[in-house]
Image (spheres, rainbow, N blue to C red):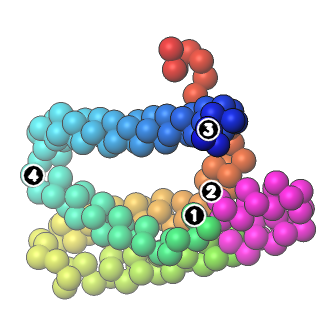
Amino acid sequence: MSATSDFPEIASEGIDQTLTVARNVSTRYLAIAVEAVLGLVVLPFNIAHLGQSAYGLWMLTASVTTYFSVLDLGYGGALVKFVAQYRARRDVRALNEILSTTFVVFATFGVVTYLVAIAIALYMGRLFQLTPEQVHTGRIVMLIASLSVAVGAARAKARPAHAATADHRAPPSVVT
């Protein structure tokens, strides 16, 4: 006799976990595919309304600000682990310490992100081959988009904290 036949709840739990992982992975890839398709569908509309030059400038700014996400350095994933761990232990002091510390870290990342964005905006004409009009517009777009990224970095601790405490099971209406 195997151990799983002695304890059918263990075998059932393993199958449930496998199904949950498979469902989560497949829905994540589905979301990525939907985003890609929507991007391709909306592309002609954006180019027609913005023009090639403005759309290219928008993509340049979006590409530069996307690199700022590297500043996370894995702290978000670690925060999920520690928030869940301290919450399970009901260790309020440790939970407050980890959340306070990561808030300072992420706020610092936000400030650094915006300082880098300001430097890029100041030297945009030298870094990229743009017309003077594009440089002016690019600076404005860069500073606005980077402000959004910087503020997002400063409040980024809320996402992992929520992920560690939220019930991720889909409601029955979604599953059926």
Instruction: Tell me which residue sits at (25%, 35%) in the image.
Output: 38
Labels 1 and 2 touching (C-beta < 8 A): yes
Q: Are marks 1 and 4 in contact (CB under 8 Å)?
A: no
- Asked if marks 3 and 1 touch (Cβ < 8 Å), the reply is no
Name the residue that disc number 2 marks: 160
The amino acid pointed to by label 4 is: Gln
Disc number lying in front (3 or 1): 3
Extreme front residue here?
Answer: 1
Q: Quadrant of residue 154?
A: bottom right
Residue 72 versus residue 111: which sits nearer the camera?
72
Distance from label 1 to label 2 (Cα)? 7 Å
Is 116 left or right of 9, judged from the image as shown? left
Q: Which residue is the site of mark 3?
A: 1
What is the three-letter code of the residue carrying label 2?
Pro
Image-based side of 66 in relation to 83, left or right: left
Q: Main secondary structure of the magenta part?
A: helix
Q: Earlier in the sequence, mark 4 or mark 3?
A: 3
- Residue 14, percent across and down? 58, 40
